[in-house]
Image (cartoon, rainbow, N blue to C red):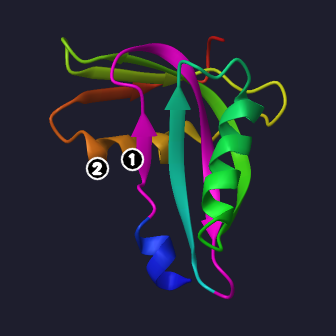
Amino acid sequence: AGEALSRVPAVQIDGDGVFKYVLLRVRGAGAPHKDVVRGHGWAEYHADLFERTAEELARHGLSCECLGGGRLAHHPEERKIHVYGYSVGFGRADHAVTTEKLKAEYPDYEITWADEGY
């Protein structure tokens, strides 16, 4: 399970636009956990992101729980991502954690967050 967990990308988000995201805690059987960010424009609801990711992870023997959600405004031409908002169903993700994950994936970006906005 540890090997499967290590292969799970920390961040998977759309390359451009404003879209919903979820912060998920992924676990293997008896293995440590890993927090990951998933954000896509096709998702009408935060639950859509959670359910699709949970299905993908289950195929590798992993489970996940949703720690909360929000929105991402990704502007690649400006090399900026802004994290904000919340999920009605899952509550507000810890945007500070999400921001750290995004900074690791996009080291040359300016990444900001705020609890305001929806």
| Percent x, y of residue 108 | 15, 35
The three-letter code of the residue at mark 1 reads Glu
Q: Which residue is mark 2?
A: 104
Q: Residue at x 42, y 54 (%)?
A: 10
| Percent x, y of residue 75 | 30, 14
- Which quarter of the rendered picture does the C terminus lie within? top right
Asked whether disc 2 touches disc 1, contact meaning CB atoms under 8 Å apart, the reply is: yes
Magenta span has 14?
A: yes
Q: Furthest-right residue in view?
A: 89
* Mark 2 vs mark 1, CA separation in Å: 6 Å
Left or right relative to 47: residue 73: left
Q: Furthest-bottom residue in view?
A: 30
Magenta stretch: give its range.
Answer: 8-30
| Percent x, y of residue 69 | 66, 34
Left or right relative to 21: residue 63: right
The three-letter code of the residue at mark 2 reads Ala
Residue 81 quadrant: top left
Q: Residue at x 72, y 32 (%)?
A: 48
- Tell me if residue 78 comes above or below residue 34 in the rendering: above
Q: Residue at x 69, y 53 (%)?
A: 54
Q: Which residue is mark 1?
A: 100
- Tell me if residue 117 comes above or below residue 99 in the rendering: above
Q: Furthest-left residue in view?
A: 108
Residue 87 quadrant: top right
| Percent x, y of residue 83 | 48, 25
Neighbour tally class for label 1: few under 14, some 14-19, many 20 plus, Cα within 10 Å: some
Magenta span: predominant SS is strand
| Element class at badge 1 | helix
